[in-house]
Image (cartoon, grey):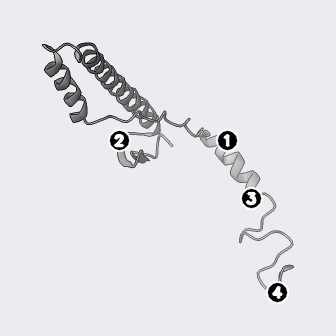
Amino acid sequence: MDEVIGQIHEISEKKLIAYTGNYSDYLTQREARYEQQLSAYKNQQKEIADLQAFADRFRSIPSKASQAQSKLKQIERLELIEKPLAPRKPVPVPDSATAARRAARDFAGRHPHGLRRDESLSGPRPHD
């Protein structure tokens, strides 16, 4: 497949994502994209936890209550990043020799027109 494919489109998390390159490049790019999304998610979760901890710590102190409220509003304004789904395991791609053997096995015993040896182009079929 690496010799044939030049671009792959994937639907993931309700989005269409275009990857350029062959199948091996796609697998590499997809894994890198997942790692980047996971890192962004973790960073945002840490930021939210830090802001919430500040607000919880200083909410009851009158001189810091407005700062605590500001941190809570900051959390509300954030555009939340959803935790990315781990990419599915790639479909193994057989080499051309394996694919040729499989095709030969699948079509073994078939007539050149795609019929089984006991069928003919004319006449009733067993299931008719």
Instruction: Work out how far the residue at label 1 is from the one at label 4, CA to CA, in angstroms.
Output: 37 Å
Tell me the element at label 3: helix
- What residue is disc 3 on? 107
Going by the numbered disc 1, the residue's amino acid type is: Thr
Q: Earlier in the sequence, mark 4 or mark 2?
A: 2
Residue at figure coordinates x 62%, y 40% from the top left: 94
Asked if the residues shown at circle 3 and circle 1 are in contact, with their CB atoms under 8 angstroms apart, the answer is no
Q: Is residue 102 left or right of residue 90?
A: right
Q: Nearer the viewer, mark 1 or mark 2?
A: 2
**Label ID, residue 123:** 4
Q: Earlier in the sequence, mark 3 or mark 1?
A: 1
Instruction: Work out how far the residue at label 1 is from the one at label 2, CA to CA, in angstroms.
Output: 26 Å
Going by the numbered disc 3, the residue's amino acid type is: Phe
**Label ID, residue 20:** 2
Determine which quarter of the picture holds residue 65.
Answer: top left
Instruction: Work out how far the residue at label 3 is from the one at label 4, CA to CA, in angstroms.
Output: 23 Å
Instruction: Work out how far the residue at label 2 is from the one at label 3, CA to CA, in angstroms.
Output: 34 Å
Going by the numbered disc 4, the residue's amino acid type is: Gly
Q: Earlier in the sequence, mark 1 or mark 4?
A: 1
- What residue is disc 1 on? 98
Q: Earlier in the sequence, mark 1 or mark 2?
A: 2
